[in-house]
Image: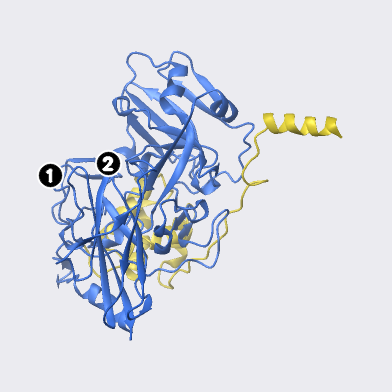
Amino acid sequence: MKRRTFFKRAILTVGTATIGNHSIEASKTIQPVDNRKVSNIAFPEKRPLITYSDRPPLLESPREVFTSSITPNDLFFVRWHMPIIPNYINPNNFHININGLVNKEIKVSLKELKEEFEQVELTAVLQCGGNNRTAFKPIAGGIQWGVGAMGCAKWKGARLSDVLKKAGLKKDAKYIGFNGEDKAVYNKTSNFVRELELEHLNNNIILAYEMNGEDLPYLNGYPLRLIIPGTYSDSWIKMISNITVLKDKQKLHFMEKAYRIPDNDCECETPDNLVQKTKPIEEMNVNSLIGYPTTGTKVKNNSNLIVRGIAFDAGHGIKRVQISLNGGELWEDATLDDGSQGKYAYRSFSYKLKPKSSGELTILCKASNEKGEEQPFAKNIKWNHGGYKYNGIDKVTIEVIA
Amino acid sequence: MIKKTVLILILLNTTLFSQVEGGITIPYINFPMKDGKGIYSTRGKCNMCHSWGYTINQGNQSKQFWRKKVIKMIAVFKAPIKSEDIDEVVNYLFENYGNGIDK
């Protein structure tokens, strides 16, 4: 009952006012939806996850997953754009084509990729740009994700730059286009193609064939996916099978319309006054999440509770994670792990807590990074039409029983 | 016996095995549609290309939002929806998955 009261309160703060049929609803941001249940049907190589769609598969990890610095493959979220995904890939035939403005168009087999290119391993966070979209009011277009459209894995693969070097880039090469094996129902529908500007190419961008020491799960892009550490995952193409190098930018819906935010200082706009000039979402904001306890968890008064969660940013480095038990007036440092997974990975944190009175207890967590950026309160995050880049201070409310 | 082992080792060295033998099957998940005027037309036009979950998990939206989405499906993704059928689909979506706001 108390839990219900809590959500009711959260809903009441939205404050919608309607005159006639036209909304003058102020754009606001609240805590994202946090109480969805996993489905009773598991997808291939996955445990049951929060399920938004089967065609294309759209699966979210529940909050409990975010207590550890590595997300297990079978709990890792899934997001595809095109509904037809090959249900069988023969690894012995699979290859990736490199074409366009290259000295020599080449096909690189999976075997060659594994054996003829230096193997690189790095741990990086993969997060959908629309993660936490349910925080935005009025509702922003797109899948209404809660907190779990993200994960962190150890990726192994070959450097994209090494593969491109083998083909040899021509002098006027400027854009690298990527696409995978997922297809639309109609052949008139364009593929999901993303582009990277050559000047953004770096040695951390890899074509990964392993995820946490195993083959990638099919639904995470088996047998090969692009990894671009520090950025949102819109360009981390799954089942990647083609790379085309070009001189000019292509006209692509998923580059020019989707995954863009207002190109102004606050990266914000209002529903009635959308900003015309936009930019790609790219670099991830500093963020953190409590994995345990979750809202509704019951604990005994005076019991020893360990709060656990994860924090990350775009690779500047997490400086500290703080916990508040009184709505943000007083903050105390949580203990961070040693950071040995590298700057693009989750830092796990823990915080020891002994509730001293019964009733509801709200726990907040906030991360800040080496660049000096700090997570704002949910209500201080400004709205954008796509519901991108939310990074509000996290909040769970538990029940302490006498 | 030794020969056999050697052969297997050679095969292991040269052949990659897929994670899931024989590939995968993605389960069908039923996302029920609310009953209402235009349900059959909408079902055919939307669910042909993607799940009903993909539609309704955009959240309850304004009439303008749903109109823009349907037009995007036609203009960007080439959905074979005739212009005279747009209103019926938009009305069904707004009546059943709307937020009561026109714009």
Query: Label 1 sits on what residue type?
Result: Asp
When asked about the image quadrant of residue B100, the answer is bottom left
Q: Chain of mark 1?
A: A
Chain B appears in which tint?
A: yellow
Q: Residue furthest bottom?
A: A402
Q: Position of residue B97 (x, y in %)?
A: 34, 68
Chain A appears in which tint?
A: blue
Is residue A250 visible in this depiction of the protein?
Answer: no
Question: Do the residues bearing badges 2 and 1 touch, measured as CB atoms within 8 Å?
Answer: no
Q: Considering only order in the chain, which callout, 1 or 2, is on the residue closer to the N terminus?
A: 1
Up-down: is A80 above or below A41? above
- Label 2: how many residues lie within 10 Å, few (<14), some (14-19) or many (20+)? some
Q: Residue furthest right?
A: B1
Q: Position of residue B18 (x, y in %)?
A: 63, 41
Given residues A339 and A289, the one toward you in this image is A339
Tally of marks: 2
Q: Chain of mark 2?
A: A
Q: CA distance from mark 2 to mark 1?
A: 14 Å
What element does badge 2 sit on?
loop
Query: Label 2 sits on what residue type?
Result: Glu
Q: Position of residue A111 (x, y in %)?
A: 60, 28
What element does badge 1 sit on?
loop
For image coordinates 32% across by 25% down, the residue present is: A198
Q: Position of residue A75 (x, y in %)?
A: 49, 56
Given residues A179 and B19, the one toward you in this image is B19
Quarter of the rendering occupied by the C terminus of chain A = bottom left
Label 2 or label 1, whichever lies nearer to me, is 2
- Kindly identify which residue carries mark 1: A265
- Kindly identify which residue carries mark 2: A283
Colour basis = by chain
